[in-house]
Amino acid sequence: MIYPTKFAIFALFSVLPIAAQTTKGEPFEEALRESLKQYRAGNIVESTAALNQAKAVLEKVQSTKMDNTLPAIPEGWSADEMKTEDVGPLLGGGKVVKKLYKNKTGQQQVQLEVFYGSSLIKLIRGLMENESIAKGQGYETKKVNGEKVLVKKIDAKNYELSMPMDDVIMVRLTGKEAADEALMLKMMRDLDRQKIKDLVKP
């Protein structure tokens, strides 16, 4: 994962110049300073809270950079801000970056998700490598820019597209309210795969 561990964040802080430690800076540095201050005072709960604030700043920066790798908003559509969430252990753990696209009336929607560090990815990748098993699970294999994509009809009107990039990264598009499959395939085609990998791989 790209997020530093708590130990790594403290190690980073320890090499900051003295001047940087005594003057106000940007939110990440401020949170690190506060965490170290509370740690030295023996306030572990407060130190942890400040460290979590520093982590949240990194997640926000990553979300902003990730946004630049995603497909352009379709004409006549809008999109919510990106958000990063933990994936529950029942769904494989790891992280997921989400962005919801909506048409002008909001009656059609596409939920874009980028999973990383989740065991769910290996499961989907395994289906992709065995088309007969994938078909038995209701998936159809299609290609986008030479890459395999698993397409599943999740109800009478909606589709789910899954594209593992390797064992640790996967993009999934889920249609809502009869979102067009062809539009979703185009969105998958417009992803900058290499930049996504650069952002989420160690």
Image (cartoon, rainbow, N blue to C red):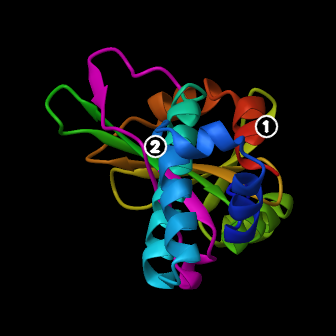
Query: In the image, what residue occupies the spot 69% across and 54% down?
Result: 13
Look at the image and tell me whether residue 81 can be seen.
Answer: yes
Q: Which residue carries the number 1 mark?
A: 147
Counting from the top left corner in percent of width and height, residue 173 is at 50, 46
Query: In the image, what residue occupies the spot 18% across and 39% down?
Result: 107
Quadrant of the image occupied by residue 178: top left
- The tally of labels here is 2
Q: Is residue 115 above or below residue 145?
A: below
Q: Which mark is residue 108?
A: none
**Furthest residue in direction top, as rendered:** 75
Q: Is residue 154 magenta?
A: no
Q: Name the residue nearer the viewer: 77 or 31.
A: 31
Instruction: Left or right? Give the position of 94 relative to 107.
Output: right
Residue type beneath disc 1: Glu
Q: Which mark is residue 27?
A: 2
Marked residue nearer the N-terminal end (1 or 2): 2
Mark 1 against mark 2, which lies toward the viewer?
2
Q: Name the residue nearer the viewer: 190 or 61.
A: 61
**Numbered disc 1: secondary structure:** strand
Which residues lie in the magenta part? 71-97
Q: Is residue 81 magenta?
A: yes
Counting from the top left corner in percent of width and height, residue 174 is at 44, 51
Counting from the top left corner in percent of width and height, residue 71 is at 53, 25
**Furthest residue in direction left, as rendered:** 105
Quadrant of the image occupied by residue 78: top left
